[in-house]
């Protein structure tokens, strides 16, 4: 099967840019790059969008040398933002297809071929690659199926069954036609902090635009889920406002779920329980009023940003 995929890819040449946004990663980033440099066939280019303010000497020397030899393009970027880093890759990419991976992954040697074989079909606009990792999140079962819009919640990207027409992919392993990403205006920089849901948002927008997304379990990688760095950019901590915690979920809900029952279930039950009524507040009830105000502020801000984004897209 894999040999046929490589031959099919050669029959109709589609070029790939491999993009690796990175932040505060050292040895694990180098291991990822070593894995990427062994790929056969090779991508047209490897973009490293580097948001780390200062690397250790080993990493700095490796990146500088690889960039000098032309085996990677090392692009420095500040301030850190995962969505902005992805959009930088969209601007810089020369390949027909842009493949995004995380900076803490292990790639099989035919990784590029497995993605690109799907693009022999002109209807395919994006690929959700399979993911292996040690601690896999559990996806709830929903007898009788679910709306495509809820794939992010119920469709397991860790599965083994090829599926055509999904509306989700995982940030650490997905690809899309470069021209479509540009047409859609790139990834939505309204998603803040760790940019949770920015990848889902793009998948939903591709699906809503009529583009076909294929889940290909053979376009697979191993995600190491390193405990620091990566997407953990300005993750809410004590120094950051509490409204950051639910904001990305609220923003996604207003953008794509309103006014469905799933929207109200999220806003009035699940998120409220997980933020305002979380254990720390229940055992310190004097915190609840302030937490409730932050929750409402998050919702109102998400609504306003969703309205602005909708107007921006309507005028594009």
Image (tube, helix red, strand yellow):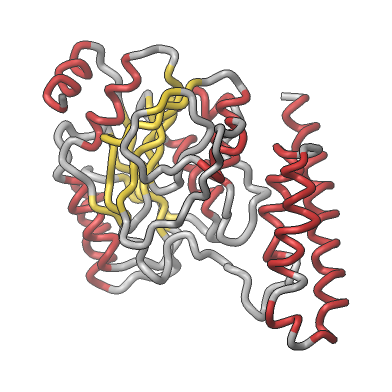
Counting from the top left corner in percent of width and height, residue 173 is at: 37, 43
- Relative side of 174 to 195, left or right: left
- Relative side of 182 to 132, left or right: right
Instruction: Give the residue furthest to the left.
Output: 3
Counting from the top left corner in percent of width and height, residue 56 is at: 30, 73
Viewer-nearest residue: 32 or 302: 302
Viewer-nearest residue: 29 or 133: 133
Instruction: Report the quarter where the N terminus lies.
Output: top left
- Relative side of 2 to 292, left or right: left
As displayed, is residue 120 above or below residue 36? Answer: above
- Relative side of 176 to 48, left or right: right
Counting from the top left corner in percent of width and height, residue 269 is at: 76, 58
Instruction: Give the residue furthest to the front.
Output: 143
What residue do we see at 55% from left, 33% from top?
145
Counting from the top left corner in percent of width and height, residue 192 is at: 64, 57
As displayed, is residue 96 above or below residue 151? Answer: above
What residue do we see at 49% from left, 29% from top?
166
Instruction: Report the quarter where the C terminus lies.
Output: top right
What residue do we see at 40% from left, 27% from top?
163
What residue do we see at 63% from left, 47% from top?
189
Query: Image quadrant of residue 259?
Result: top right
As displayed, is residue 47 above or below residue 116? Answer: below
Q: How many marks?
A: 0
């Amino acid at each position: 099967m894999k040999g046929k995929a490589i031959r099919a890819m050669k029959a109709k040449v589609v070029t790939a840019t491999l993009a690796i946004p990175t932040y505060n990663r050292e040895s694990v980033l180098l291991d990822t790059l070593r894995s990427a440099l062994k790929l056969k066939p090779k991508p047209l280019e490897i973009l490293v969008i580097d948001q780390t303010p200062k690397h250790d000497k080993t990493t700095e020397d490796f990146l500088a040398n690889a960039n000098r030899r032309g085996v990677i393009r090392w692009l420095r970027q500040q301030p850190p933002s995962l969505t902005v880093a992805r959009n930088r890759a969209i601007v810089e990419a020369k390949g027909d297809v842009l493949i995004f991976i995380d900076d803490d992954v292990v790639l099989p040697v035919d990784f590029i071929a497995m993605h690109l074989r799907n693009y022999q079909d002109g209807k395919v606009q994006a690929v959700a690659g399979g993911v292996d990792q040690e601690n896999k999140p559990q996806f709830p079962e929903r007898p009788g199926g679910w709306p495509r819009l809820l794939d992010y919640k119920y469709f397991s990207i860790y599965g083994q069954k090829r599926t055509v027409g999904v509306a989700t992919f995982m940030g650490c392993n997905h690809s899309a036609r470069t021209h479509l990403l540009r047409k859609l205006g790139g990834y939505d920089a309204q998603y803040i902090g760790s940019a949770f849901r920015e990848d889902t948002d793009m998948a939903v927008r591709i699906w809503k635009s009529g583009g076909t997304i294929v889940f290909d379990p053979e376009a697979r990688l191993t995600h190491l889920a390193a405990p620091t760095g990566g997407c953990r950019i300005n993750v809410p901590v004590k120094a950051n406002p509490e409204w950051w915690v639910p904001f990305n979920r609220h923003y996604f809900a207003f953008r794509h779920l309103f006014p469905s029952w799933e929207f109200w279930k999220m806003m009035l039950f699940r998120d409220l329980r997980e933020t305002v009524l979380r254990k720390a507040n229940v055992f310190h009830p004097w915190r609840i009023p302030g937490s409730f105000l932050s929750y409402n502020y998050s919702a109102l801000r998400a609504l306003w940003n969703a309205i602005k984004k909708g107007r921006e897209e309507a005028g594009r």
